[in-house]
Each structure stands twice: as structure tokens, then as C-alpha cells.
């Protein structure tokens, strides 16, 4: 089963149906077994870069978390994790906005951003044990990683394997493009995290817009898609493309990783 975002471009609210989309696995069109709206509650991790050099002050990071705390729907829960060289829980799973607010003073700026290690830690410790199918990470960062043991490629593949969708609230690139050739550029990291998992990118200067858009989308435009691939070579990743008819926008992860 795959989490998909689907909406009509004319803003009509009637559900998108399986007859209005096509699925291509490794370039071959597939028969859709099921495509249904998923209004179930979400489990959302806010993964916040609070390393020393991020071009956002602590107050901006606090505001980002606060906006989400007041925008989530009934039944949704937030986990807030700050990271530098280590990923640390700022606020454990809750839907209590006041409790979240009171915990935000734990943000502080220090150290280097180990983004990929932080994502892997969130997957392994917070999301993999969870049965909820609507698992979301919102990365609040410019996308810079400096020193992770995990590689970007393995991190993205793990997100795709777990069907975790990543949204990004993007800060200004602190490197201004000046970074070693063997290190992924921050903007490329943000772009690939969102595109590779079916998420979306917002600016850190539009925090209220980002929080509302993400929370609304997860409750109103989220679907579950299932199909049986006609061919699945053992041990190989396969490209995935889900496209809608004219007037329908669809986003999904871009790869099916091997089981």
C-alpha cells in the first residue's frame, strides 16, 4: 500500500477515483487493486535543525513548532525532535498544544547538522514500531548535512521502503552553494526528500501557510493506493509513477524499494 496525495485543480472536493489515475511500475502500467480516501489521523514528526549555523534564530524554530501544534486535526499527534550531532526529543507524542509550547525552550543552537542520522533515528525509534499508515516527517532545515554516518541515498531509500512522506520547511541555504563536490548540496537534499517521498516544500518565511497546508492536505487529500506489480525483479528498486487525468494533481513516492 502506498500513501498518495490527490486533488482536483478546480478545488472541487468530490473524491478522486481509481478510474481517474494510472500507475506505472518500472514504466509498465499496472492494474489498480484499490484507491480510497484516507481521512485517518496522522503521526507527524517535526524534525528541527537546531545546529549552530542554521540561518534561523531559535524564536523562528519555536514558531514553526507552535504553528503545527495549533493546526493539527483531532486525532493527529506530533513528536518534535531537535538535532545537531544528536537527535533529541523536545516534545514527545502529543496533541496538547499548550504542552508543546511549554517544551519549546529546549531548542538551542549548537553543533553540526547530522540530518541523515537524525532521519534514520526517527525512522528506527519513532516510526517503524508504529502501525499507523499515515507517518509523516516535516524537516525544518536548509538540507545541510555535515558529518552523518548514514548516506543520503540509503536514508531516502529507507523512507521509501517505510512509505514515510517527507515535507520540508526550507531555511536559507547557509552554504550559499559553496560545498564540497562529494557532499549533496542542501537544496538538492530538500528537493529529493520531498520529490522522492511525495511530499512538498514550503519556505520558513511562511510558517503559518506551511502548517495549515500540510495538516489540511493530510486529512483532506490523502489516499491509499494498492496494486500488485506485474513484474518485480528480485532485489531491485523500481521506478514508480502515479499520474492523474487532466485536472487532477497527484503526488507519491518515486521509487518502490525491494522488499
Image (tube, rainbow, N blue to C red):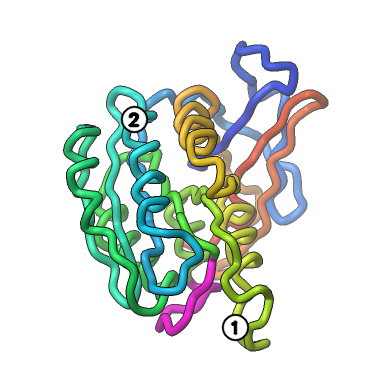
Q: Is 70 contained in the magenta span? A: no
Q: Residue 143: where, in percent of width, then height? A: 54, 66
- Examine the rendered structure and indicate whether residue 230 appears above or below residue 73: below
Label 2, secondary structure: give it. helix
Q: Which residue is mark 1?
A: 183
* Residue lying at 52% horizontally and 48% vertically, measured from the top left: 167
In front of the other: label 2 or label 1? 2
Q: Nearer the viewer, residue 160 or 204?
A: 204
Q: Outermost residue, right direction?
A: 246
Instruction: Give the distance between the C-alpha atoms of the residues marked 2 and 1, in whole angstroms.
Output: 36 Å
Q: Nearer the viewer, residue 2 or 98?
A: 98
Q: In terms of sequence position, does the residue under pointer 2 or pointer 1 come before the other?
A: 2
- Tell me whether the residue at label 2 lies in contact with that at label 1, contact meaning CB atoms closer than 8 angstroms: no
Q: Is residue 132 left or right of residue 183?
A: left
Q: Which residue is mark 2?
A: 70
Label 1, secondary structure: give it. loop
* Residue lying at 42% horizontally and 54% vertically, measured from the top left: 162
Q: Is residue 149 left or right of residue 176?
A: left
Q: Residue 127: where, in percent of width, then height? A: 31, 53
Q: Over which residues does the magenta segment extend?
A: 143-154
Characterize the local packing of mark 2: few (<14), some (14-19) or many (20 or more) Cα atoms within 10 angstroms. some
Q: Is residue 189 left or right of residue 224?
A: right
Amino acid at each position: 500500500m502506498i500513501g498518495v496525495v490527490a486533488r482536483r485543480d478546480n478545488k472541487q472536493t468530490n473524491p478522486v477515483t481509481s478510474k481517474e489515475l494510472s500507475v506505472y511500475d518500472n514504466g509498465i502500467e499496472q492494474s489498480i487493486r484499490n484507491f480510497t480516501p484516507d481521512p485517518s489521523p496522522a503521526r507527524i514528526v517535526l524534525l528541527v535543525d537546531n545546529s549552530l549555523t542554521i540561518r534561523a534564530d531559535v524564536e523562528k524554530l519555536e514558531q514553526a513548532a507552535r504553528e503545527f501544534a495549533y493546526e493539527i486535526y483531532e486525532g493527529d499527534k506530533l513528536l518534535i525532535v531537535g538535532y545537531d550531532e544528536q537527535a533529541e526529543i523536545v516534545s514527545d507524542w502529543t496533541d496538547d498544544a499548550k504542552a508543546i509550547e511549554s517544551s519549546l525552550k529546549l531548542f538551542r543552537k549548537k553543533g553540526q547538522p547530522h540530518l541523515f542520522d537524525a532521519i534514520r533515528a526517527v525512522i528506527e525509534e519513532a516510526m517503524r514500531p508504529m502501525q499507523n499508515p499515515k507517518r509523516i516527517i516535516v524537516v525544518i532545515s536548509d538540507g545541510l548535512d555535515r558529518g552523518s554516518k548514514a548516506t543520503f541515498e540509503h536514508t531516502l531509500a529507507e523512507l521509501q521502503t517505510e512509505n514515510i512522506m517527507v515535507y520540508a520547511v526550507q531555511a536559507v541555504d547557509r552554504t550559499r552553494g559553496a560545498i564540497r563536490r562529494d557532499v549533496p548540496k542542501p537544496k538538492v537534499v530538500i528537493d529529493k526528500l520531498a520529490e522522492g517521498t511525495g511530499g512538498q516544500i514550503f519556505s520558513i518565511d511562511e510558517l503559518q501557510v506551511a502548517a495549515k497546508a500540510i495538516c489540511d492536505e493530510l486529512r483532506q487529500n490523502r489516499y491509499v493506493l494498492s496494486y500488485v506489480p506485474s513484474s518485480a525483479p528480485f532485489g531491485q528498486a523500481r521506478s514508480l509513477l502515479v499520474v492523474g487525468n487532466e485536472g487532477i494533481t497527484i503526488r507519491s513516492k518515486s521509487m518502490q524499494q525491494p522488499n
